[in-house]
């Protein structure tokens, strides 16, 4: 009986170790996150990839970049 309990304990420890070392793989349906930045002219928050970087500031469009310069 004690051997059976010992065997179950060993299997449980091995299972938990393998589970903890397994890398979490992102699923195809998971959304991709992106940093948000604030337009220096109007204050609107938008994804960093959609913004325009000029002079260390982010802008939501060319018009706001030009208006900020004036």
Image (cartoon, rainbow, N blue to C red):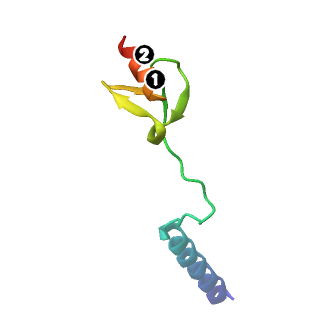
Q: Percent from the top left, x then y, of residue 38?
A: 49, 26
Residue for badge 1 = 63
**Looking at the image, is 40 positioned above or below residue 8?**
above
Q: Are marks 2 and 1 in contact (CB under 8 Å)?
A: yes
Q: Dot 1: few (<14), some (14–19), or many (≥20) neighbours within 10 Å?
A: few
The quadrant of the picture occupied by the C terminus is top left
Name which residue lies at 53% across and 65% down: 24
Observer-nearest residue: 43 or 26? 43
Q: Quadrant of residue 48?
A: top left
Q: Quadrant of residue 2?
A: bottom right
Name which residue lies at 47% across and 29% down: 61
Q: Percent from the top left, x then y, of residue 27?
A: 59, 65
Name which residue lies at 59% across and 66% down: 28
In the picture as drawn, the residue positioned furthest to the left comes out as 55
Q: Secondary structure at mark 2?
A: helix
Q: CA distance from mark 2 to mark 1?
A: 6 Å
Q: Dot 2: few (<14), some (14–19), or many (≥20) neighbours within 10 Å?
A: few
Q: Percent from the top left, x then y, of residue 25?
A: 53, 67
Query: Is residue 59 found left or right of 43 in the rendered image?
Result: left
Residue for badge 2 = 67
Q: Secondary structure at mark 1?
A: helix
Total marks drawn?
Answer: 2
Query: Is residue 23 found left or right of 1 in the rendered image?
Result: left
The quadrant of the picture occupied by the N terminus is bottom right
**Looking at the image, is 68 positioned above or below residue 9?**
above
Query: Is residue 38 found left or right of 15 in the rendered image?
Result: left
**Looking at the image, is 11 positioned above or below residue 63?**
below
Q: Quadrant of residue 19?
A: bottom right
Name which residue lies at 65% across and 88% down: 4
In the picture as drawn, the residue positioned furthest to the top comes out as 70
């Amino acid at each position: 009986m004690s051997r059976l309990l010992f065997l179950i304990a060993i299997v449980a420890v091995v299972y938990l170790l393998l589970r903890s070392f397994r890398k979490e793989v992102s699923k195809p349906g998971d959304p991709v996150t992106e940093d948000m930045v604030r337009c220096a002219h109007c204050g609107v928050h938008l994804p960093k990839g959609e913004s325009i970087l000029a002079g260390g500031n982010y802008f939501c469009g060319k018009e706001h970049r030009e208006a900020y310069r004036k």
